[in-house]
Structure formats: C-alpha cells, structure tokens
Image: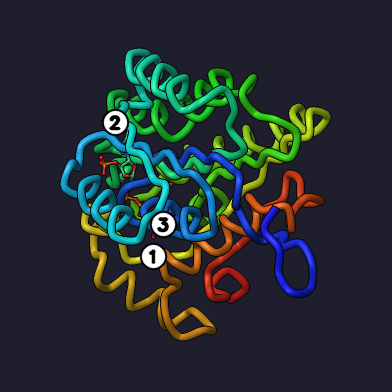
Amino acid sequence: MATTANGPDLFSLSGKTILVAGGTRGIGQAISLRFARAGATVIANYLRNEQAAEDLKAIAAEEGLAISLCRADLSSERGLEQLDRSLQEWGPHLSGLVYCAATGIHRPIEELTDRHFDWTFSLNVRAFFKLIKLTKARFSKGSSIVAISSWGATRVLPYYSLVGSSKGALEALARHLAVELAPDGVRVNILTAGAVLTDAWKAMPNSEARIAETIRRTPAGRLVTAEEVAYGAQFLCSDAASGIVGHTLILDGGTGIMA
Ligand SMILES: NC(=O)c1ccc[n+]([C@@H]2O[C@H](COP(=O)([O-])OP(=O)(O)OC[C@H]3O[C@@H](n4cnc5c(N)ncnc54)[C@H](OP(=O)(O)O)[C@@H]3O)[C@@H](O)[C@H]2O)c1
C-alpha cells in the first residue's frame, strides 16, 4: 500500500486493477487518467472512437501510466466475450469497475421507437448487468464498483425520458447488487454527476440554452468538470471509502439542492 508521511495513503489506487467501461472519452477518459495517476492499472474500454483511444494511449505513454485499451461493444454478446478474453490476458483479478458507458436518444415520447428503447437500455442497463455477471468471480475482497448516473434518474429533464429511465434502472440495479455483493467484500455505489461538457451534449436538443440554465441554477456558478467527477470516482474506488456501500455520491456543484 502507498504511504504518506502520516501513514498509509488510503486514497491511493496503487496495486488495483480497474476496468473503466466507456473509459476513453469524456468523463470516462478523465477517470482512466485520474485512476492511473493514482497508481492503478487501468483497462479502458471503448467502442467506436479510435482517435479518442489513441489520444488516451499517447497521454499514457508520455506520462508512463499503466492504461491498456480494450475495444468491445458491451451491448452485444460478442463484445462481452471479447472483453472476457482480454481480461484473462490482464490477469485473474479485478479490484474495481467504473461503469461510464452510456448512450441514448433524446426525443419527445411520440418520436421514440422500440428500437430506440432497446438501443438505450441494452447499453445503459443490460450491459452493466451482464458485465457484473461476467466479472463477479474476478472481484476480490475490497473491490469497488461504481455506476455513473445522472439527475435524469430521479428528475425530469427535457427529451430525457429514455436515458433518464435507463439511469433509474441502473441505479436500482446497483443498489440491489450493493446488498448482494457486500458479504463478499465488494462495494457497489452510484456517482451522480451534474452536467459536464462532453461530446454527449452535442446530441442534446437546445444544449446551449440548457447549459446556460444549469449554470444559472448551480450555486457554484459553473458546471462541474470531468476531472472533478473523476476525483469522486477515485474516492469511491479507494480504501478510504471502505465503509461506503449502496450510496449515491452527488457531484453537481449544488444544482440538485435548488428548488
Ligand atoms: N456529460 C454529462 O453531462 C453527464 C452528466 C451526468 C452523467 N453522465 C454520465 O457519465 C457517463 C459518461 O458520460 P460522457 O458525457 O463522458 O459520455 P461520452 O462522452 O458520450 O462517452 C461515452 C463513452 O461510452 C463509450 N461507449 C458508447 N457505446 C459503447 C458500447 N456499446 N460499448 C462500449 N463502450 C461504449 C464511448 O466509446 P467511444 O468513444 O468508442 O464511442 C465513450 O467512451 C455516462 O454514463 C453518462 O450518462 C454524463
């Protein structure tokens, strides 16, 4: 274990191998970098954006960080099998999983189809469920699983019915898993982020007006950053959070407390 002048550094991730699902872009990229800088060996999963994966690889090489890439579609059986094979190459154990991968269609209900529903839920909920089943035996005592969620799970946001309901399901699943896995020494928690400027906002209708409104409503007077969310995820995956189980950490600059 890493130490400080005052004793063991419980916030360090040294010696931990952590899978970041959706870990090459946006919030996931910030988490992969933060974790590796805190001493973890990181496996960053992604699907389509090779450029973002290459950029992360270049930063890791420059800083000497232990980040490996794993391209796999988590919403498909084939992708999960691929991920499983890759995990075997990296060793038998995992000490953490941060589930960042997400997708969604932002439209009013009359424009949403079954296909949109299946597309959104297959990654945002089912893939998390399948991933836990796939990796459960790899988690040793002291491991930590973090599901990244958003305010849409519990609040109504414009054109967010599909993503919001999928996040609600993700959170409920995470809480049930928290109870089921706690006896094995595996902690499951939720990290709810406020709005963070990432590519995801490009697909959001009226994004500029909504971001301005979020800033106006946020006591901190600004959006939170991906790096700030990453520090929250680091805490939840560190031994400093060993007593935190089934909790939702809200990291939003205070937006959520406003009436
Ligand atoms: N941005 C926000 O304001 C905000 C607020 C609250 C919560 N969140 C949550 O934070 C998480 C990250 O958000 P973000 O804004 O950083 O998202 P993002 O920039 O859209 O990144 C999504 C990540 O998921 C990966 N991904 C997409 N489909 C995948 C699949 N089928 N299999 C494996 N990986 C896949 C992407 O890989 P590729 O790069 O290869 O496409 C990418 O790494 C999400 O869970 C999101 O709901 C975001």
Q: From this view, report whether residue 57 is shown above or below residue 208.
A: above
Could you say where residue 97 lies in the image, as x and y percent from the top left?
55, 38
* Neighbourhood count class around disc 3 (C-alpha, 10 Å): few under 14, some 14–19, many 20 upward: many
Residue at 21 percent across and 36 percent down: it is 48
Per the rendering, the mark at residue 33 is 3
Q: Is mark 1 within 8 Å of ligand 1?
A: yes
Residue under label 2:
71
Q: Position of residue 98 (x, y in %)?
A: 52, 43
How many circles with numbers are drawn on the protein? 3
Amino acid type at circle 1 is Val
Does the beta carbon of the residue at mark 2 sit less than 8 Å from ligand 1? yes
Side of 29 where 236 appears, left or right: right
Considering the numbered disc 1 on the image, is that residue within a helix, a strand or a loop? loop
Going from the N terminus, do you reach mark 3 or mark 1 first?
Answer: 3
Left or right of 214 on screen, residue 254: right
Residue 226 lies, with reference to residue 184, above or below; the image says below
Q: Earlier in the sequence, mark 3 or mark 2?
A: 3
Residue bearing the label numbered 1: 196
Cα distance in 3D space between marks 3 and 2:
17 Å
